[in-house]
Amino acid sequence: MQIDLNCDIGELAAGERNGIDISPSEEALLDVVTSVNIACGYHAGDHNSMAAIMRAAASRKLSVGAHPSLMDREGFGRREMTVAPIEIYNLVLYQIGALSAFARAAGTVVGHVKPHGALYHMAEKDPEVAEAIVSAVRDALPGAAIVGQSGGALVAMALRMKLRAANEVFADRGYRPDGSLQPRDRPNAVITDPMRAAERIAGLLQIGAIEAIDGSMLALSADTVCVHGDNPRAPEFARILAKTLVDSGVVLKSLGR
């Protein structure tokens, strides 16, 4: 079995960086994961964090992805908004373009795109949103993969439009029986025990299913597993997850390799 271990990164507030462009926790994450999704400035991050994390990821030969968002720094990109499809296309294209420039400067390429927060979930409910995202990726990076909810509408749209796609599962989030994530403001939405999170993913890779919040078993495909970089315990989660998977016979392999 093979799996990619990805993290959303570059999402710390400026004050959490202690005046530097990349934090110790981000450095620690980069030493464990195989792919990164770099915040492109709309919900978090800026030109300095994008440049620094890109350089650090390139030096480790990690697969690099863009993590575009709605323009919502105040809400960390987690608030759904009414946005016309053409604007979604434009904002995704803009953020991919910015990160691609930093990738070229660092001697690497942007190999995948994973929408952030509300944009990620809006794509599951609105085909026009999904099509706008995939169209932007197709026009900016035709060889890149779209990372989306396992078995979801964004992955299906990417495949329909002849782009590569990767089914993503979450180590630290609770699943509803229909395969959607439990909203963060509801019980059992976030798993705080890193060992429990790791064991759930190891079990998923063994049997192809994970326990939903109602106790039922939910079948999921998994190409990549996400660790949220804004979690203060993210490096610990990533280390325990990686070790648990490797100990169970799983090979960690990045999306781009």
Image: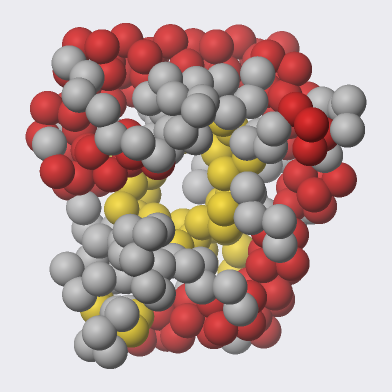
| Vertical position of residue 204 compared to residue 91: above or below | below
Residue at 26% x, 11% y: name it.
Answer: 87
| Vertical position of residue 229 compared to residue 186: above or below | above
Residue at 40% x, 79% y: name it.
Answer: 204
Tell me if 86 is positioned left or right of 24 in this view.
left
Residue 246 visible in the picture: no
| Vertical position of residue 203 compared to residue 156: above or below | below
Tell me if 36 is positioned left or right of 212 in this view.
right
Q: Position of residue 236 (x, y in %)?
A: 74, 67
The residue lying furthest to the bottom in this view is 215
Colour mode of the rendering: secondary structure
- Residue 140, by quadrant, is top left
| Vertical position of residue 165 compared to residue 241: above or below | above
Residue at 58% x, 73% y: name it.
Answer: 192
> How many marks can you see?
0
Q: Position of residue 111 (x, y in %)?
A: 50, 32
- Residue 181, by quadrant, is bottom left
Q: Position of residue 175 (x, y in %)?
A: 32, 70
Tell me if 256 is positioned left or right of 189 in this view.
right
Residue 256 visible in the picture: yes
Tell me if 41 is positioned left or right of 61 in this view.
left
- Residue 237, by quadrant, is bottom right
Q: Position of residue 220 (x, y in %)?
A: 28, 70
